[in-house]
Image: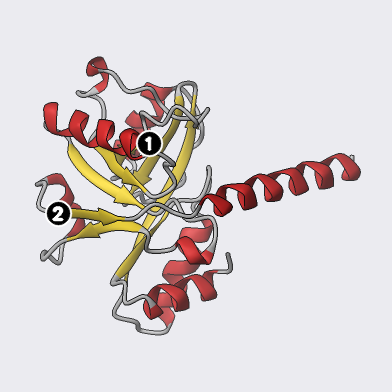
């Protein structure tokens, strides 16, 4: 997704902001932030990243620098050093090969759990995550996990506070969302296949 179109689409959907979390880079988030700043928009952009670890993917929000992939504990430590908060996305989605399988032993290490992910095909996976967060008193977030424009805004949080970070950590947010269409998953697989083929041809 081009940053300009992402912001335009989010505004059309009457969103007040976006958390941009590309895989192992903050470049896209910074581009979106710059567009909003340069256009003087009343729109919040959270600098984020989805980081690969030895146990699966971890989300970072509000970071001031890019976090390198590494061990689970190392990445969580670096997120805090970068001024951010961590969230575990879709931890009980059995169809995701890169999901962290969160256990009770991890709750002291992480800040948040994603209680709703719009790309979870089955409601049960989101329910398990939400209930886990409640049981262990974790902050609960939600996300679109958007790979295409039509998915933007399918999941998120609502808060009355201006300080979004504080609202999340104080658990003063309401999560919302609806599941993305199955066809979007097929589209992602086609894109990944296309990238793999291009990489093979370039070698």
Please tell me in which quadrant of the rendered image residue 103 appears: top left
Percent of width and height locating residue 189 = 65, 44
Q: Is residue 65 left or right of residue 190?
A: left
Residue to which mark 2 is pinned: 173
Percent of width and height locating residue 120 = 41, 42
Q: CA distance from mark 1 to mark 2?
A: 18 Å
Lower sequence index among marks 1 and 2: 1
Please tell me in which quadrant of the rendered image residue 42 appears: bottom left
Q: Residue at x 47, y 37 (%)?
A: 51
Q: Residue at x 82, y 43 (%)?
A: 197
Q: Is residue 103 above or below residue 38?
A: above
Q: Look at the numbered disc 1 and give the secondary structure of its residue.
A: loop
Which quadrant holds the C terminus?
top right
| Residue ranking furthest to the top | 105
Crowd tier of the residue under label 1, counting other residues whose Cα lies within 10 Å: few below 14, some 14–19, many 20 or above: many
Q: Is residue 146 above or below residue 39?
A: above
Residue to which mark 1 is pinned: 90
The front one of 182 and 159 is 182
Tell me, for residue 5, which label it has, or none: none
């Amino acid at each position: 997704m081009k940053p300009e179109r992402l912001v335009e689409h989010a505004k059309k959907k009457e969103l007040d902001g976006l958390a941009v979390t590309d895989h192992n880079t903050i470049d896209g988030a910074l581009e979106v932030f710059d567009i909003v700043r340069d256009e003087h928009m009343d729109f919040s952009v959270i600098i984020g990243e989805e980081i690969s670890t030895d146990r699966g993917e971890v989300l970072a929000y509000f970071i001031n620098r890019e976090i390198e992939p590494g061990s689970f504990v190392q990445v969580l430590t670096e997120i805090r050093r970068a001024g951010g908060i961590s969230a575990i996305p879709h931890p009980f989605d059995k169809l995701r090969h890169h999901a962290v399988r969160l256990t009770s032993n991890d709750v002291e290490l992480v800040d948040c759990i994603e209680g709703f992910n719009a790309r979870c095909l089955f409601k049960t996976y989101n329910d398990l995550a939400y209930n886990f967060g409640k049981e262990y008193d974790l902050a609960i977030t939600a996300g679109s996990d958007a790979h295409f424009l039509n998915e933007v805004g399918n999941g998120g949080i609502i808060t009355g506070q201006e300080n979004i970070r504080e609202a999340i950590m104080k658990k003063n947010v309401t999560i919302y969302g609806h599941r993305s269409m199955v066809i979007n998953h097929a589209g992602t697989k086609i894109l990944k296949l296309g990238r793999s083929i291009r990489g093979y041809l370039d070698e």
